[in-house]
Image: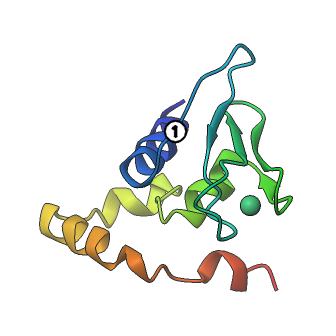
């Protein structure tokens, strides 16, 4: 599952990711609440993610959106980031856009 790999790589570039355990779950820090001490986020390629601290849960696609990973491959095909734009995007990640949350309301 390519999107899951993208999510895993993105998380590994930021924080420690443990796993997979015997259930296929990866465990890491939750991007939906502030806690840098307790890895409460469980991620599974098929089941999606679930945070046991703030109860955030959803699909891998939801998690990818939260992390700023493009999930719509139809638009990214015609609107691909150049390498320099990709680097710029990484540099800007300290202030992630809030699109994922505002779209739901
Ligand atoms: Zn959480």
- What is the number of callouts on the image? 1
Question: Residue 25: x and y, percent?
Answer: 69, 28
Near-viewer residue (21 or 90) = 21
Element at label 1: loop
Question: Residue 74: x and y, percent?
Answer: 47, 56
Near-viewer residue (80 or 49) = 49
Q: Quadrant of the N terminus?
A: top right
Near-viewer residue (29 or 77) = 29
Residue at 39% x, 60% y is: 76
Residue position for label 1: 17
Question: Residue 5: x and y, percent?
Answer: 47, 35
Q: Quadrant of residue 49?
A: top right
In the picture provided, is 56 more to the left or to the right than 43? right
Q: Is residue 16 above or below residue 98?
A: above
Residue positioned most to the front: 37
Q: Quadrant of the C terminus?
A: bottom right
Q: Does ligand 1 reach within 8 Å of label 1's beta carbon?
A: no
In the picture provided, is 52 more to the left or to the right than 40? right
Residue at 71% x, 79% y is: 101
Q: Is residue 77 above or below residue 94?
A: above
């Amino acid at each position: 599952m390519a999107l899951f790999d993208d999510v895993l790589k993105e998380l590994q570039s930021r924080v420690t990711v443990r796993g997979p355990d015997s259930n296929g779950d990866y465990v890491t820090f939750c991007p939906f609440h502030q806690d840098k001490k307790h890895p409460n986020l469980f991620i599974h390629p098929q089941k999606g993610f679930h945070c046991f601290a703030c109860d955030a849960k959803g699909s891998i696609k939801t998690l990818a959106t939260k992390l700023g990973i493009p999930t719509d491959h139809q638009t990214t095909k015609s609107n691909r980031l150049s390498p320099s734009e990709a680097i710029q995007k990484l540099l800007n990640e300290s202030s992630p856009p809030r699109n994922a949350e505002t779209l739901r309301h």
